[in-house]
Image (cartoon, coloured by chain):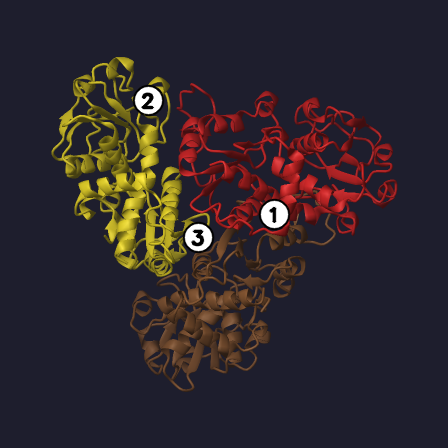
Chain colours: A red, B brown, C yellow
Amino acid sequence: MKYFTTVNDVADANDLVHEALQWKHSPFASPDIGRNKVLGLIFFNASLRTRMSTQRAAMNLGMTCMVMNIGNEGWALEFHDGAVMNGKTVEHIRDAAAVMGLYCDIIGVRCFPTLIDKQADYSESVLLQFMKYSRAPLISLESATLHPLQSLADIMTIRECVDVKQPKVVLTWAPHMKPLPQVVANSFAEWALHCDYKLTITQPAGYELCEDFTRGADIEYDQEKALKDADVVYVKNWSAYNAYGDMPSVEQNWMLNDEKMKLTSQAKLMHCMPVRRNLEVPDALLDNAYSLIMKQAENRIYAAQAVLFRMLQTI
Amino acid sequence: MKYFTTVNDVADANDLVHEALQWKHSPFASPDIGRNKVLGLIFFNASLRTRMSTQRAAMNLGMTCMVMNIGNEGWALEFHDGAVMNGKTVEHIRDAAAVMGLYCDIIGVRCFPTLIDKQADYSESVLLQFMKYSRAPLISLESATLHPLQSLADIMTIRECVDVKQPKVVLTWAPHMKPLPQVVANSFAEWALHCDYKLTITQPAGYELCEDFTRGADIEYDQEKALKDADVVYVKNWSAYNAYGDMPSVEQNWMLNDEKMKLTSQAKLMHCMPVRRNLEVPDALLDNAYSLIMKQAENRIYAAQAVLFRMLQTI
Amino acid sequence: MKYFTTVNDVADANDLVHEALQWKHSPFASPDIGRNKVLGLIFFNASLRTRMSTQRAAMNLGMTCMVMNIGNEGWALEFHDGAVMNGKTVEHIRDAAAVMGLYCDIIGVRCFPTLIDKQADYSESVLLQFMKYSRAPLISLESATLHPLQSLADIMTIRECVDVKQPKVVLTWAPHMKPLPQVVANSFAEWALHCDYKLTITQPAGYELCEDFTRGADIEYDQEKALKDADVVYVKNWSAYNAYGDMPSVEQNWMLNDEKMKLTSQAKLMHCMPVRRNLEVPDALLDNAYSLIMKQAENRIYAAQAVLFRMLQTI
């Protein structure tokens, strides 16, 4: 595996989920495969779980990490081909990416969307330039449209904790006070559908996700209807895809609560974190026994480890 | 040892001092105990000595480090239980701490006081929340009230360099131009008294420390009287504890000088650094043969190593 | 080798170039020499290539790295001896450097010039204070006047890729929109001349470099004349040395182009990067087959590795 940026980069997603669960049971089963190998973690944006879990995964495999915070440690990068660089950008992505690829055996890149330029974001212009100019295998640490390490950990968590044959999985929009990327929702939909889960997405009008990622899911604008008989409820806020980056006004209260959870079939609760407590989800739900949020976070280590291991096998 | 946040976390402080001195003589005596173990160093505040000496200590034991600068690398954290997070904070400490505890075998946290909210600071609200929500063993890298790694290194240094049976140890306030925490003074007093040193604290009126840490010390408002026959003079500035965070005006010149040092019994000079030269202490004293400041800094490695080793033994 | 700050620190520069090329062919030939050794990388300024290539080199030799960004991770440092530190600086360089030397086996320091205080810059006041106060071996990661790791990689690259007996090497000034240090030009001149290359330097009037570094080179104000029969063209912008830090106006267009390259003897093109594309050098040249910029960047690893190895042998 040379790239890990979407579920489509994975030949056999269910096998990868299985491997990730195996790493969880024996994290130090292959301590030498990463010897003399360097993982470069390149952050255009802040990170806690991804930063730490990926380092942990690399260390479990014997790799060394180099962390680089673009912006406060390096140079402002130029992304336009042919640009006359007489402005604020100091180095072109084609040079920076190429050089990083020389210094690292595997590169991880986090590059959030602008939420302004839909075309640039949804064409993954930054990530694709990294892949084009760097010869190294590349892992998305969350891009403009997808967050595959999170989704792999999410599917692992369902596999691990939801003991229902054909679980009904519901992805529900939640309130927020500022516009967030659609990334986690896109990515969870993509992975859940690819892994053959029955997925229902519920959101207020105006918050429809990009169909490229949701094709095959049931779309239900009535949250309570959607929650009915759910085995898994994945909560997440996102801003509008159509009126890109906007926050169309919402009349109803979309925050989950105990009443709504009672509509489900004793569903497990999921959220990728960071979570704004009592704005997106109430404390009482997040800290309930049915909450899987800490499992999801823990599984981030083994998701990253499974991906790194596959890459290390081929370099 | 699961926690190292105060001398009271240590069953046998004098033994720990002894062990730390042994690590200094053979730093690589146990290169494998840290294999496959990760130390997470979480900084809410700037750090040089603590950051580097603790990494060095971990490396001497074969551990891997992950450094995380909250604020410029991660998310703004929320500390209030039950908060509706519709403001600037992105993640609650209960989630962030829990997650870090999943990724690290041991966590170190640096969290300075506000110097505004005395109650929050002296209840160690940040540190205690970390301990409450993270399952991992935790080392204070300097908290709102104490700096135990510094104090352990300080006591090591006295043990190593002061060849007097019952040395008279004097902690003296020094001038500064901005309000500093009481942390180092509290902590040195706590450790010195716990280790049965005869401690005199001298400060201008208004700069009395919290009695919880100084009970058992002689308090002397006349600096020259205090210095008389001292074997060790520990210099440090701190702001007021009573009029919390204030800098009550001081008439006399409290900066040490050669004349004052002559009152002592050829005392050694100590300071935890960073030191504002010629404001807190004159160059001539800091660079004198009796200055132990570089020994203190060097011993920071072995203090951290002794603590890490004890923790590694129990996980 | 205790210091690596200029070609004059190297007894036998040509041998070091040769060793660096050998490391390139077997980077893992000495995986244990760095065991239990720590390299501290201290950055006063941003860095990409130097930061990552030096970490990579250390890792190839089995060393552990600690990276410290002064300013956003540590304290503002004071550089004046005898200063009464009642301003913004929190710690004196004599203390900070000494302490870092205690925690690291080798220190690397990046400290750019001010471009304002010529005397301070050209006396290397920051670097020399580090060397004076820290007992550890020290590598310049680019100082106020020189960038020896870059130059060693540059000479390696010429040795590796230019198959001409006595190549004509031309260092040409290029346009820019803000004042840059003279560092890379000084350093390349120093190394090229020391290694007995025939060096021509071409620049507009007003941009003459400091003669301490260029003595022995041909100075030619006519760029086209200079380029004639060149085997290597090294492109770089720098601000004025005489009218220090200024950018005297330049009438002609000094940017290289295809026409100018045709004057050369099928010259190879070099640049240290980061390069402002289409301002300093056109895309078409940088991405041409004769461009060595990626080789230079790659060789940064092995230049650093050769230097670290020599230092490790003596500590």
* Residue A57 visible: yes
Q: Distance of mark 2 from mark 3, alpha carbons?
A: 37 Å
Front residue of C303/C255: it is C303
Percent x, y of residue A309? 54, 42
Type of amino acid at the residue the image marks with label 2: Val
Q: Chain of mark 3?
A: C
> Is C227 positioned to the left or the right of A232 in the image?
left
Element under label 1?
helix
Question: Tag 3: Cα neighbours inside 10 Å, few (<14), some, or many (≥20)?
Answer: some
The structure residue drawn at horizontal position 64% and vertical position 65%, both measured from the top left corner, is: B123
Question: Which residue matches tag 2?
Answer: C281
Instruction: Return the chain for callout 2.
Output: C
Which quadrant holds the N terminus of chain A? top right
State the separation of the CA atoms marked 1 and 3: 37 Å
Let me know if residue B245 appears in the view.
Answer: no
Label 1 sits on residue: A23
Q: Nearer the viewer, mark 2 or mark 3?
A: 2
Question: How many residues crowd around disc 1 within 10 Å: few (fewer than 14), some, or many (20 or more)?
Answer: many
- Residue type at mark 3? Gly
- Which residue is rendered at x = 40% and y = 24% of the image? A85
Check disc 2: other Cα within 10 Å, few if <14, some if 14-19, many if 20+.
Answer: many
Residue C47 lies in quadrant: top left
Q: Say which element carries label 3.
A: loop
Q: In the drawing, does residue B32 fall left or right of residue C23?
A: right
The front one of C58 and C137 is: C58
Residue at mark 3: C74
Marks 2 and 3: CB-CB under 8 Å?
no
- At horizontal 54% and vertical 64% (from top left) the residue drawn is B312
